[in-house]
Image: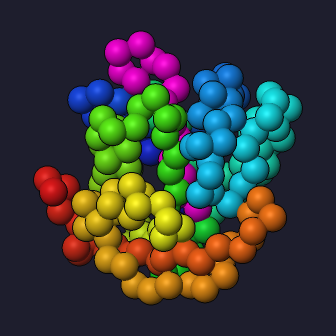
Protein backbone atom coordinates (compact mmCIF):
# COMPACT_ATOMS: atom_id res chain seq x y z
CA UNK A 1 0.00 0.00 0.00
CA UNK A 2 1.48 3.39 -0.92
CA UNK A 3 2.10 6.18 1.54
CA UNK A 4 -1.31 7.83 1.89
CA UNK A 5 -1.63 11.52 2.80
CA UNK A 6 -3.45 12.05 6.10
CA UNK A 7 -6.06 14.69 6.86
CA UNK A 8 -4.53 18.05 7.86
CA UNK A 9 -2.68 17.82 11.17
CA UNK A 10 -3.46 20.62 13.63
CA UNK A 11 -1.26 21.65 16.52
CA UNK A 12 -1.75 24.56 18.91
CA UNK A 13 0.01 27.01 16.54
CA UNK A 14 0.23 25.23 13.20
CA UNK A 15 -1.52 23.28 10.48
CA UNK A 16 0.49 20.66 8.58
CA UNK A 17 -1.24 19.62 5.36
CA UNK A 18 -0.44 18.29 1.93
CA UNK A 19 1.01 20.96 -0.33
CA UNK A 20 -0.88 22.68 -3.14
CA UNK A 21 0.40 24.87 -5.95
CA UNK A 22 -1.10 27.91 -4.16
CA UNK A 23 1.53 27.43 -1.41
CA UNK A 24 4.46 28.14 -3.75
CA UNK A 25 4.73 31.92 -3.16
CA UNK A 26 4.96 31.34 0.59
CA UNK A 27 7.49 28.54 0.14
CA UNK A 28 9.50 30.81 -2.15
CA UNK A 29 10.23 33.01 0.87
CA UNK A 30 11.48 29.97 2.81
CA UNK A 31 13.47 28.18 0.10
CA UNK A 32 14.68 31.42 -1.47
CA UNK A 33 16.79 32.22 1.60
CA UNK A 34 20.44 31.12 1.39
CA UNK A 35 20.70 30.98 5.18
CA UNK A 36 17.76 28.57 5.38
CA UNK A 37 19.08 26.26 2.66
CA UNK A 38 22.78 26.42 3.54
CA UNK A 39 22.87 22.87 4.96
CA UNK A 40 20.42 21.36 2.50
CA UNK A 41 21.49 19.46 -0.62
CA UNK A 42 19.30 21.43 -3.01
CA UNK A 43 19.84 24.81 -4.59
CA UNK A 44 18.24 27.91 -3.12
CA UNK A 45 15.24 28.92 -5.18
CA UNK A 46 15.89 32.09 -7.18
CA UNK A 47 12.53 32.53 -8.88
CA UNK A 48 8.96 31.29 -8.89
CA UNK A 49 10.03 29.19 -11.89
CA UNK A 50 12.34 27.25 -9.54
CA UNK A 51 9.39 26.76 -7.18
CA UNK A 52 7.13 25.59 -10.01
CA UNK A 53 9.74 23.14 -11.32
CA UNK A 54 10.17 21.73 -7.80
CA UNK A 55 6.39 21.44 -7.38
CA UNK A 56 6.04 19.54 -10.65
CA UNK A 57 8.82 17.17 -9.61
CA UNK A 58 7.37 16.53 -6.13
CA UNK A 59 3.88 16.05 -7.58
CA UNK A 60 5.26 13.30 -9.81
CA UNK A 61 7.04 11.64 -6.89
CA UNK A 62 3.89 11.81 -4.75
CA UNK A 63 1.92 10.12 -7.53
CA UNK A 64 4.11 7.02 -7.07
CA UNK A 65 3.02 6.70 -3.43
CA UNK A 66 6.62 6.95 -2.24
CA UNK A 67 6.37 10.46 -0.77
CA UNK A 68 4.04 13.02 0.73
CA UNK A 69 5.05 16.69 0.76
CA UNK A 70 3.51 18.89 3.44
CA UNK A 71 3.37 22.62 3.98
CA UNK A 72 3.48 24.09 7.48
CA UNK A 73 1.04 26.96 8.04
CA UNK A 74 0.56 29.35 10.93
CA UNK A 75 -2.89 28.87 12.45
CA UNK A 76 -2.99 32.57 13.32
CA UNK A 77 -2.91 33.87 9.75
CA UNK A 78 -2.56 30.81 7.46
CA UNK A 79 0.86 32.02 6.27
CA UNK A 80 3.44 29.49 5.09
CA UNK A 81 6.21 29.05 7.67
CA UNK A 82 7.89 25.93 6.32
CA UNK A 83 7.53 22.47 4.87
CA UNK A 84 8.10 18.86 5.80
CA UNK A 85 8.24 15.66 3.84
CA UNK A 86 8.02 11.90 4.15
CA UNK A 87 9.84 10.29 1.23
CA UNK A 88 11.64 7.19 -0.02
CA UNK A 89 8.86 5.11 1.50
CA UNK A 90 9.62 1.39 1.52
CA UNK A 91 6.33 -0.45 1.86
CA UNK A 92 7.80 -3.84 2.77
CA UNK A 93 9.77 -2.35 5.64
CA UNK A 94 7.19 0.35 6.50
CA UNK A 95 10.13 2.77 6.51
CA UNK A 96 10.34 6.36 5.30
CA UNK A 97 12.74 9.27 5.39
CA UNK A 98 11.88 12.58 6.99
CA UNK A 99 12.81 16.05 5.79
CA UNK A 100 11.86 19.54 6.95
CA UNK A 101 12.63 23.21 6.48
CA UNK A 102 11.47 26.27 8.40
CA UNK A 103 11.63 29.93 7.42
CA UNK A 104 14.33 31.91 9.18
CA UNK A 105 11.83 34.36 10.74
CA UNK A 106 10.34 31.39 12.61
CA UNK A 107 13.56 30.00 14.08
CA UNK A 108 13.93 29.69 17.84
CA UNK A 109 10.19 29.51 18.58
CA UNK A 110 9.78 25.72 18.77
CA UNK A 111 7.70 25.60 15.59
CA UNK A 112 9.87 23.00 13.84
CA UNK A 113 9.58 20.71 16.84
CA UNK A 114 5.82 21.25 16.96
CA UNK A 115 5.30 20.55 13.25
CA UNK A 116 7.78 17.72 12.83
CA UNK A 117 6.63 16.11 16.09
CA UNK A 118 3.03 16.18 14.87
CA UNK A 119 4.05 14.65 11.54
CA UNK A 120 6.09 11.93 13.26
CA UNK A 121 3.10 11.04 15.44
CA UNK A 122 0.83 10.84 12.39
CA UNK A 123 3.39 8.81 10.42
CA UNK A 124 3.61 6.25 13.23
CA UNK A 125 -0.14 6.30 13.77
CA UNK A 126 -2.56 6.79 10.89
CA UNK A 127 0.05 6.34 8.15
CA UNK A 128 1.36 3.03 9.49
CA UNK A 129 5.07 3.81 9.27
CA UNK A 130 7.28 1.62 11.51
CA UNK A 131 10.63 3.40 11.14
CA UNK A 132 11.64 6.95 10.27
CA UNK A 133 15.10 8.06 9.20
CA UNK A 134 16.59 11.51 8.80
CA UNK A 135 19.91 12.50 7.27
CA UNK A 136 21.36 15.75 8.56
CA UNK A 137 24.55 17.67 7.91
CA UNK A 138 26.45 17.46 11.23
CA UNK A 139 27.21 21.19 10.95
CA UNK A 140 23.47 21.85 11.23
CA UNK A 141 23.35 21.57 15.02
CA UNK A 142 19.82 23.02 15.42
CA UNK A 143 18.53 20.19 13.21
CA UNK A 144 20.53 17.59 15.15
CA UNK A 145 19.07 18.94 18.41
CA UNK A 146 15.55 18.85 16.95
CA UNK A 147 15.88 15.18 16.04
CA UNK A 148 17.34 14.34 19.44
CA UNK A 149 14.50 16.17 21.19
CA UNK A 150 12.02 14.00 19.29
CA UNK A 151 13.77 10.80 20.39
CA UNK A 152 15.76 10.00 17.25
CA UNK A 153 19.00 8.07 17.78
CA UNK A 154 22.18 8.96 15.90
CA UNK A 155 22.98 5.74 14.09
CA UNK A 156 26.09 6.68 12.21
CA UNK A 157 28.01 9.00 9.93
CA UNK A 158 27.65 8.58 6.18
CA UNK A 159 30.83 10.02 4.76
CA UNK A 160 30.58 12.20 1.65
CA UNK A 161 26.91 11.22 1.27
CA UNK A 162 25.54 14.43 -0.25
CA UNK A 163 26.79 16.53 -3.09
CA UNK A 164 25.11 19.90 -3.23
CA UNK A 165 26.03 23.42 -4.22
CA UNK A 166 29.34 22.18 -5.57
CA UNK A 167 30.43 20.62 -2.25
CA UNK A 168 30.52 17.14 -0.81
CA UNK A 169 28.99 16.69 2.66
CA UNK A 170 29.00 14.08 5.36
CA UNK A 171 25.61 13.39 6.94
CA UNK A 172 24.56 11.85 10.20
CA UNK A 173 21.88 9.19 9.98
CA UNK A 174 19.24 9.40 12.71
CA UNK A 175 16.50 6.81 13.20
CA UNK A 176 13.36 6.42 15.26
CA UNK A 177 11.14 3.36 15.62
CA UNK A 178 7.41 3.59 16.19
CA UNK A 179 7.84 1.55 19.40
CA UNK A 180 10.23 4.23 20.71
CA UNK A 181 7.99 7.20 19.91
CA UNK A 182 6.87 9.17 22.93
CA UNK A 183 4.51 11.93 21.76
CA UNK A 184 4.68 13.91 25.01
CA UNK A 185 8.49 14.28 24.93
Question: Which residue shows up at 75% across the image and 39% down it?
Answer: 45
Which quarter shows the N terminus?
bottom right
Q: Can you name the residue that lies furthest to the left here?
A: 184
- The majority secondary structure of the magenta stretch comes to strand
Question: Which residue shows up at 62% across the image and 57% down it?
Answer: 40
Using the image, determine if residue 161 lies above or below residue 18: below
Residue 79, magenta (yes or no): yes
Question: Which residue shows up at 57% across the image and 43% down it?
Answer: 36
Q: Can you name the residue that lies furthest to the top here?
A: 77
Which image quadrant is residue 131 in?
bottom left
- In percent of width and height, residue 100 lies at 50, 50
Question: Which residue shows up at 66% across the image and 82% down it?
Answer: 160
- In percent of width and height, residue 46 lies at 80, 34
Q: Say left or right for 124 vs 163.
A: left
Using the image, determine if residue 151 lies above or below residue 9: below
Inspect this view and state whether residue 135 appears.
no
The residue segment tinted magenta is 74-87
Using the image, determine if residue 22 lies above or below residue 175: above
Amino acid sequence: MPLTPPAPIETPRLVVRQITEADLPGLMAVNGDDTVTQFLPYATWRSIDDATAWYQRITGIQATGNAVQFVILSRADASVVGACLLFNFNEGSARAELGYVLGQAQWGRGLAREAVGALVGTAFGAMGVRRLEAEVNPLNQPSVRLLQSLGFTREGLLRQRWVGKGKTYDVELHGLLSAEWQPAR
